[in-house]
Image (tube, helix red, strand yellow):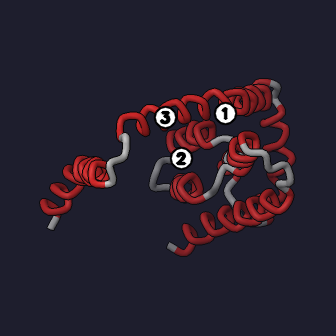
């Protein structure tokens, strides 16, 4: 069974490209011109997104370099203790909604300090895989589009994120 899956996974992308090319030839579409147009659009999107990405990374660096992250961790510690969430996860919970890659560094730090099989290590892994980067997504998608009213998206993202944090912790408690 695993050999069949490995063959399928190796052949999937070439087969998909072949199907797309054959469909384009059948429809007599200018395949190369469409590809070049898509590549131009992709590069334009990268250029449009870049300022938002730079802004997020600068904000994260300012948060950690200024000592604000340590202050937030100390301020949030009593609440996390009350909710039975390990203190090792505080910085991850604070950083995850802002940056996925920044939070992976925090997950790595948690794994090094507590071990991957520890409760904080498992909860951090589940949280990194299941919780969304709210501010990153909002800045990226709403920054590039003309949509300016993001109140409902923000509230939905925040509720989903909080649910994901609690689910990550409490599922790991029960498993």
User: Which is nearer the eye, 40 or 33?
Assistant: 33
Residue 158 place in picture, x, y as percent? 77, 60
Tell me the quarter of the picture where residue 155 sits.
bottom right
Q: Residue at x 79, y 44 (%)?
A: 73
Q: Which mark is residue 114?
A: 2
Image height of 27 relative to 170, above or below = above
Image height of 67 relative to 28, above or below = above
User: Which is nearer the eye, 117 or 130?
Assistant: 130
Tell me the quarter of the picture where residue 41 sits.
top right
Element assignment for label 3 = helix
Q: CA distance from mark 1 to mark 2?
A: 36 Å
Q: Can the viewer see residue 76 in this picture?
A: yes
Could you tell which of marks 1 and 3 lies nearer the N-terminus? 3
Neighbourhood count class around disc 3 (C-alpha, 10 Å): few under 14, some 14–19, many 20 upward:
few
Q: CA distance from mark 2 to mark 3?
A: 49 Å
Residue 14 place in picture, x, y as percent? 23, 47
Counting labels gives 3
Q: CA distance from mark 1 to mark 3?
A: 18 Å
Q: Can the viewer see residue 64 in this picture?
A: no
Q: Residue at x 24, y 49 (%)?
A: 18
Residue 127 place in picture, x, y as percent? 59, 57
Q: Which mark is residue 37?
A: 3
Residue where numbered disc 1 is placed: 49
**Mark 2 or 3: the one toward you:** 3
What quarter of the picture does the N terminus occupy? bottom left
């Amino acid at each position: 069974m695993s050999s069949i899956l490995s063959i399928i996974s190796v052949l999937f992308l070439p087969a998909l490209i072949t199907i797309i090319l054959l469909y384009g030839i059948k429809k007599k579409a200018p395949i190369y011109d469409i590809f070049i147009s898509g590549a131009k659009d992709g590069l334009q999107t990268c250029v449009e997104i870049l300022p938002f990405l730079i802004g997020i990374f600068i904000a994260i660096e300012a948060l950690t370099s200024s000592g604000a992250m340590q202050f937030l961790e100390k301020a949030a510690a009593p609440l996390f203790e009350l909710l039975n969430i390990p203190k090792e996860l505080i910085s991850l919970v604070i950083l995850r909604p802002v940056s996925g890659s920044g939070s992976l560094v925090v997950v790595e730090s948690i794994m090094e300090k507590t071990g991957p099989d520890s409760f904080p290590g498992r909860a951090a892994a589940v949280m990194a895989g299941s919780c969304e980067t709210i501010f990153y997504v909002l800045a990226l998608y709403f920054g590039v589009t003309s949509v300016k009213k993001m109140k409902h998206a923000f509230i939905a993202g925040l509720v989903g994120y909080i649910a994901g944090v609690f689910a990550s912790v409490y599922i790991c408690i029960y498993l």
